[in-house]
Amino acid sequence: MGHSEPSDYTFKFFQEDFRVKNAWSQVVRKLDKDKLQQIDQRHPIKTWVAFFRFLKKNPHWKFVCIITGEVIEKRDYDSENIRLHHNDRNKKNDNEMNLFCIFSAIHGIINNAQRHWEELSIYFENLTVSNFLTIKKGEIPRSWKIGWRKCAKEQGIKIPLNKYLRRGKHNKKFVKIKKYMKPIDEY
């Protein structure tokens, strides 16, 4: 989860134990169609190796992208396909409600929106916080069920056609959106 301009960030932001601690807020398991459980975040695990080892030993727990609900796997970390995103654009704000793990493709879309499309940028800022609070309440975020693009369109935000691929054929979603996707229980 690298970044190109380290001088803009806090020292803590680059510490592995801080990043792993932050990731726990996005570890959930599905209880039923509309309910999930967030893992107890008081884990002593402080390294990515131990974090992914825990997930492998406890397959009912999933580390998910806050925007899409896609399962983040060790191979995504190994290939640097995830980013720790500052939601409010302030690289010095390391508050839990401001830092979220997201896929690189989504991070690129958000960064582009922040530079060129204020309405979409604000939508993403609100969506990440809303999804975070929804998870804390034990519910599955709506954007995970129908997709962030459809949610944006419902709010009257005109967005371009979906021309990008998320992660390829191995995508695993936390909840089923399309007929060809298996529910999370089948993984």
Image (cartoon, rainbow, N blue to C red):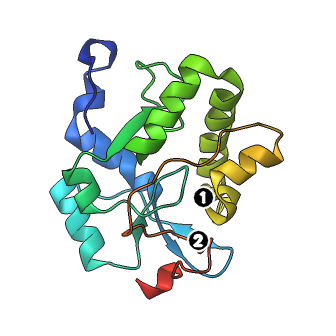
Dot 2 amino acid type: Leu
Q: Quadrant of residue 62?
A: bottom left
- Compare marks 2 and 1 and give the one earlier in the sequence: 2
Q: Position of residue 77 (x, y in %)?
A: 25, 52
User: Are there few (<14), some (14-19), or many (20+) residues within 10 Å of tag 2?
Assistant: many
Up the image or down, 168 lies above or below 130; here it is below
Q: Position of residue 149 (x, y in %)?
A: 67, 49
Q: Which type of secondary structure does the marked residue at label 1 adopt?
A: helix
- Residue at the location (64% across, 23% down)? 117
Q: Is residue 76 left or right of residue 26?
A: left
Circle number at residue 36: 2
**Can residue 139 be seen?**
no
Q: Position of residue 88 (x, y in %)?
A: 55, 25
Q: Are marks 2 and 1 in contact (CB under 8 Å)?
A: yes
Label count reads 2
Q: Nearer the viewer, residue 65 or 10?
A: 65
In which quadrant will I find the N terminus?
A: top left
- Residue at the location (62% across, 33% down)? 125
Q: Name the residue that disc number 1 marks.
A: 135
- Residue at the location (59% across, 49% down)? 162
Q: Is residue 63 left or right of residue 185?
A: left
Spatial separation of the CA atoms under disc 2 and disc 1: 7 Å
- Residue at the location (29% across, 48% down)? 20
Q: Quadrant of residue 72?
A: bottom left
Q: Is residue 48 left or right of residue 31?
A: left
